[in-house]
Image: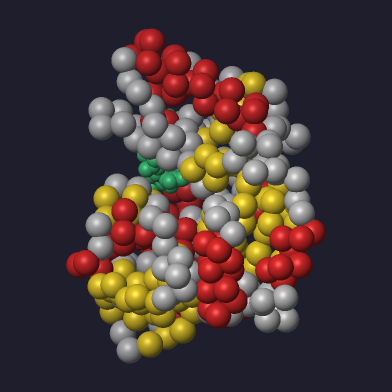
């Protein structure tokens, strides 16, 4: 299938969606990733409502096109050739809401983690503090069971609403889901619509103080330049950042992609980096880790496109 955006695709899907939806051809995904690299999406869709999302998924099935769910693009490396098929982003207001419900928070998949953490603090709900510094959406965080400060997203989950590619909606309890370190098999090929999160009752002042502590730790150990967060999963024997540091690779560049001097597991875009630069740097690091330490580094960041 061609990667050239086709107006025909745009017309066919566009007329099936409500007015608040966004449908574009050839949308540059560098605009939608924190690493600021990546080629265009053949078709890019922001559905306004769940019914629009269902239409989009049915359209993908009918036309045998692949679809990809884009969150805040914070854990994503899009290759320079762009993405074939349909890229769906749940960033419209309906999907970004955070509602206080009996003892928990009901969050749309597109809700920003920073906002979820802020609402939990206001409401005196403890356990959400680690979300404060993760630059993603809750849907994306569940998809990969994102974590920080010893916590992971699924620690908070009570129940998830999910859409199948048929457009049907199912609800799953946390106990029914297959969850592991940085992955959730139960969400593969499905779309998170919303999630009920539960923490524990806590003192808002203590919660705020813990958030400040996490923020200070993050600011002192992680770079602020554009990146995709930690590039590699931590191997069982040594944290990836320490390993890359010990290999003397901090500051190493391929094109405008550089290993951060602040944290070895962060590859930063110095401005104008291409996905090929970042992929070259990944391979250089993996090669050194394999040859010098016998460690096979696995990327945590999702790599898509061609
Ligand atoms: N270290 C070094 N040199 C470095 C970086 C780290 O020696 O350049 C050492 C640290 O001193 C520490 C150890 O390696 O002893 C681990 O480092 P850190 O505490 O920074 O944690 P991490 O395992 O590298 C994990 C998550 C981060 C999360 C932090 C904070 C993974 C792959 N990474 O990092 O998540 O923010 O803990 O809790 O699990 C992400 O997922 O994108 C991410 C950034």
Q: Position of residue 268 (x, y in %)?
A: 61, 35
Q: Is residue 161 left or right of residue 218?
A: left
Seen in the picture, residue 65 relative to 99 is either above or below; the reply is above
Taking the image as drawn, is residue 111 in sight?
A: no
Q: Name the outermost residue toward the left.
A: 175
Q: Quadrant of the C terminus?
A: top right
Q: Position of residue 266 (x, y in %)?
A: 52, 35
Q: Is residue 72 left or right of residue 158?
A: right
Seen in the picture, residue 93 relative to 243 is either above or below; the reply is below
Name the residue nearer the viewer: 14 or 185. Answer: 14
Seen in the picture, residue 291 relative to 123 is either above or below; the reply is above
Determine which quarter of the picture holds residue 81. top right
Determine which quarter of the picture holds residue 246. top left
Ligand 1 quadrant assignment: top left
Name the residue nearer the viewer: 304 or 109. Answer: 304
Q: Position of residue 205 (x, y in %)?
A: 40, 74
Q: Residue at x 56, y 33 (%)?
A: 267
Q: Name the outermost residue toward the top.
A: 291
Q: Is residue 209 left or right of residue 158?
A: right
Taking the image as drawn, is residue 75 in sight?
A: yes
Q: Position of residue 185 (x, y in %)?
A: 31, 53
Name the residue nearer the viewer: 303 or 288. Answer: 303
Q: Residue at x 71, y 68 (%)?
A: 12
Q: Residue at x 72, y 60 (%)?
A: 9
Q: Residue at x 44, y 35 (%)?
A: 299
């Amino acid at each position: 299938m061609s990667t050239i955006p086709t107006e025909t695709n745009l017309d066919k899907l566009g007329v099936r969606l409500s007015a608040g939806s966004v449908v574009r051809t050839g949308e540059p995904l560098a605009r939608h990733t924190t690493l600021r690299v990546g080629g265009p999406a053949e078709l890019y869709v922001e559905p306004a409502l769940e019914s629009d999302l269902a239409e989009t998924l049915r359209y993908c099935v009918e036309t045998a096109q692949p679809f990809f769910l884009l969150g805040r693009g914070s854990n994503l490396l899009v290759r320079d050739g762009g993405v074939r098929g349909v890229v769906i982003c749940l960033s419209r207001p309906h999907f970004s809401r955070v509602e206080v419900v009996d003892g928990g928070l009901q969050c749309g998949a597109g809700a920003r983690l920073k906002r979820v953490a802020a609402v939990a603090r206001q409401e005196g709900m403890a356990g959400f503090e680690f979300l404060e510094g993760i630059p993603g959406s809750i849907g994306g965080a569940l998809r990969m069971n994102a974590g920080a400060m010893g916590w992971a997203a699924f620690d908070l989950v009570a129940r998830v609403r999910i859409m199948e590619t048929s457009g049907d909606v199912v609800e799953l309890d946390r106990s029914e889901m297959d969850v592991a370190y940085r992955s959730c098999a139960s969400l593969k090929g499905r779309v998170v619509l919303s999630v009920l999160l539960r923490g524990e009752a806590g003192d808002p002042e203590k919660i705020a103080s813990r958030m400040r502590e996490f923020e200070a730790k993050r600011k002192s150990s992680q770079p602020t330049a554009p990146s995709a967060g930690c590039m590699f999963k931590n191997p069982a024997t040594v944290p990836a950042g320490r390993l890359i540091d010990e290999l003397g690779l901090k500051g190493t560049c391929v094109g405008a992609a550089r290993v951060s001097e602040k944290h070895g597991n962060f590859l930063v875009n110095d401005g104008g980096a291409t996905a090929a630069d970042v992929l070259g740097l990944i391979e250089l690091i993996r090669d050194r880790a394999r040859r010098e330490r016998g460690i096979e580094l696995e990327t945590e960041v999702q790599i898509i496109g061609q």
